[in-house]
Image (tube, rainbow, N blue to C red):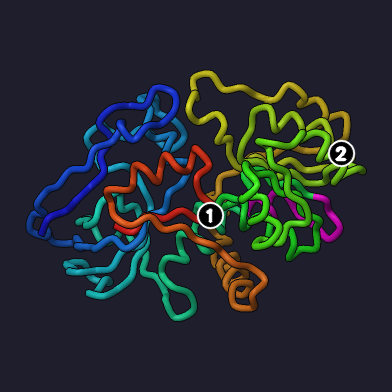
Amino acid sequence: MINKKAVLVTRPEGDLSEANFKIMEEELAELPDGHVRLQVEHLSIDAFIRTTLDARDGHHGSMALDSPVIALGTARVLESKFDGLNQGDAVFGPLGAQSYVQLPGEMFRVLDESDQPARAYLGALGMTTGLTAYSGMINVGEVAQGDVIVVSAAAGAVGSIACQIGKIKGATVIGIAGGAHKCEYLLNEIGCDFAIDYKADDIGAKLDEYAPDGVNLFFDSVGGELLDLVLDRLAMAARVVICGAISQYNHLENVTGPSLYLRVAERNSSMRGFTVDYYMSEFPKMESDISGWLNDGSLKMPEQVEEGIDNFPKALCMLFNGGHTGKLLVAP
């Protein structure tokens, strides 16, 4: 059986490029005891992958050259020599950017497909997507009825869910995204009350118009100058949730931080960062809530699926150049 994989051949210097990757093929070895052979069905394209491509050992580690790019995904068991996983089972785990994988069975979670399809565990029910949005909005941000909230990178996977959780909880939601198409997506598909096009609009002026009494909650995945613009418009006792800083991931050796952080003190507010795995004990409740919202129609997860492992590098670059909406997946 031939496995096709996307490997890192050169470390990016600044902006990510498809030239940093190469598609390679290999023949799978005989399956060892305790291992499973999986056919990969969907791979999750996530911002954290970029932080693993540099030589420095960041929060998510540093991957080796000539190795399949780190990626979470869902797969189907083709053959099992591990007690507890059977042929045909759907699983979730660290698959890497490849079409087949052979790894110890203990690394994978069996998925219940009776309520939602397996790929939902990368999107609305995904640790890096829906569970991240839930953790940040509810556990950290404590979103409440009547809040005026701002979500950056709002047309992306996490942002799309964060905006909808805000609406479910009774907040007024202002989404920030790049381009008229994405703003239409936020207003017409996701249900935001207002959308700001950071490529064309005066962001500060739009925030003043849409949140004249200030911002109660900011869910930020962008960082940089945008963070300062919102910090300058915080209401009293506001909450700022730091989910990520995608504007900084191409130059982690020279991160630009906020200069207006004293607004947090001046307005008796808070700014907290988080990682989703900190709330792992609450995942069952989060999954139950999100699944319920999916079933009653109050939440949806638009997907963009790129076909073929050959398109994994293109999809990863697309995540950073604004070429997608919703959850970006690759189907090898």
- Horizontal relation, residue 103 to residue 229: left or right: left
Q: Residue at x 43, y 36 (%)?
A: 50
Residue of label 2: 208
User: Looking at this view, is 202 or 266 the one in front?
Assistant: 202
Q: Quadrant of residue 146?
A: bottom right
Q: Name the spot of residue 272 as percent of width and height, x first.
A: 69, 39
What is the three-letter code of the residue carrying label 2?
Asp
- Magenta span covers which residues? 135-148
The answer to whether residue 240 is visible is yes
Element carrying mark 2: helix
Q: Name the spot of residue 16 as percent of width and height, x first.
A: 41, 31
- Horizontal relation, residue 105 to residue 124: left or right: left
Q: Quadrant of the C terminus?
A: bottom left
Residue of label 1: 129
The answer to whether residue 107 is visible is no
Q: Residue at x 62, y 50 (%)?
A: 182
The residue lying furthest to the right in this view is 213
